[in-house]
Amino acid sequence: MTTTDSDASGTAVEEAITSTDPVTLSKVWGMGGMTAVLVGLVAGLLVSLERLDLEGAGIFGSGDELFQFWSAHRVALVLLGVLPILVALGTTIVPRQCGANTLLFPRAAALACWTWLIGAGMTVVGFLVDGGLGTPDGGGQRQATALTLMGLLLVIGGLMVATMCILSTILSGRAAGMGLGDIPYLSWTTLIAGTIWLGMLPVLAANAVLAYVDLRGRPAVRFGAEDAIWEQLSWVFTHPAIYLLALPVLGIALDVISSATGSEPANRGVLLVATAAFGFLSFGAYAQSFFDTPGTPIMEETIYVLAAFAIVPVAFVVLGGVLDLLRRGGSDLGSKPPASVVLSLIAILLIVAGTVLGALRVVAPWDLLETSVTGAHFTLVVGAAVIGAVAGLNHWGEDLLGSPGFPGLMLLGGLAASLGVVLISAADVVSGFLGQADFTGVDLATAGYPDSGTGALNAVSTVGAAAFLVAGLIWMVAGIRHLAVDSAGAG
């Protein structure tokens, strides 16, 4: 009996590891991404708790340790969290939307999935053993930092290969007679976002390679110096590159609300052009402050400022399309609209708010680029991406796992996340105008003005971080229960 059970268990694990089935790969991408989101939210809460006492290091032993967790929060949410969840939807839902028989290049897709997962594990371990992406005072472990960079390179490689498989399916595997202008919005926005990702991720990988090669020298000359590594990679976590996380969410919202209301937007062509423009304005590989030439900081140049303002009306155009769908078919939603519709609408509103804040952030006289307004902007856009991705997982949950899941838990988590995002971003915006830096360190000198009154605002931000973490825990419970139901049904 015991032998039989062991063999069955081994066979199941072997099948999971060697499978090229898009649904199986989506489970790995989705659960791995949600786990990383949870890790990022834990790191964010710890950093928020430290900000409550800027006169000393109460939780972390030094500013270097705090910086490692601060940067881990952003890496985990973007490269290890939201992007993989979007890949999960692209792996399973996009081929079905395009009428493809399956995902093209399934073995490459499987290789991408496990490469990303191994890289994600290495990246997390690198942060935990005092590595990460450098530290301000050079107090990290050189070998652990090298491990983090190697893990990050595997993560980038996995994401790139997976993206190429999805884009190949859209371009070459869609049903005969279906033009690119006919594909659903999720597939369209994934096509645009994926194309831009393939233009930016190699640049990010090149940054990481430069840092790794120099770091391995004795001593590091420039690129691998611990106080310089983050600056070479930070561009992917801010305007304009961060908006690429939100682009597929726009497609999710349009598809989800269109399906729920049974209506189609009257201005489909306009929406296709608007989402394409959103992607074009999100290309951010040029916005690298580390390579600024003297007297011409990239964040003050025309292209950077214009992109920040130009993306605002584009976001409002998409919001108009969503509101048009609700106007046309809102009566069909009843008194209790589906959780996916509520979460999609919240995500769209947060994206619009994020673009507005991104425009305000680059107004030169306010001097907000290095303040906590940048953190608030990150929270709004990434929070919207997380909520929108969860809306997509809920809407297509039955296609992914064969059962409808637990929409009540997903909605509860979404509302908690929305509260957390609003509290964090609102508090950090006000703190930024009062002079608080984006990375505050563990002393008042790096936090802005000692008497600026940011202490109470940091407390509000901490409550928001706790609410966001609670949301992540609720979603994780819902995901585990959903997988359990799926496994029981399969058995």
Image (spheres, helix red, strand yellow):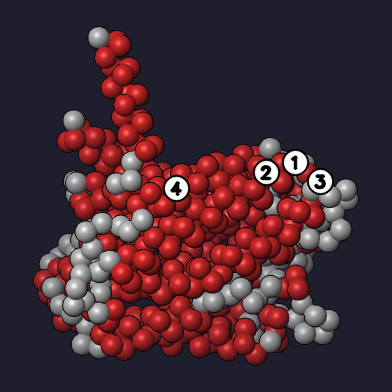
Q: Which of marks 1 and 4 is nearer the N terminus?
A: 4
Give above or below for 428 relative to 278: above
Residue under label 1, please give it.
Answer: 143
Give the Cα separation between the discs numbered 1 and 2. 6 Å
- Give the image location of residue 254, x and y in percent: 28, 73
Residue under pointer 2: 147
- Kindly indicate whether the residue at mark 4 contacts the one at mark 3 (C-beta within 8 angstroms): no
At 62% from the left edge and 64% from the top edge, which residue is drawn?
204
How far apart marks 1 and 4 lie (CA) works out to 26 Å
Residue type, numbered disc 4: Leu
Give the residue displayed 45% in from the left and 51% down from the top.
112
- For mark 3, give the secondary structure: loop
Q: Residue at x 78, y 44 (%)?
A: 142
Query: Are circles 1 and 2 on residues that touch, CB within 8 Å?
Result: yes
Q: Position of residue 370 (x, y in %)?
A: 70, 71
Mark 2 residue type: Leu
Residue 415 in view: no
Numbered circle sitting on residue 111: 4
Q: What element carries label 2?
A: helix
Mark 3 vs mark 4: in front: 4
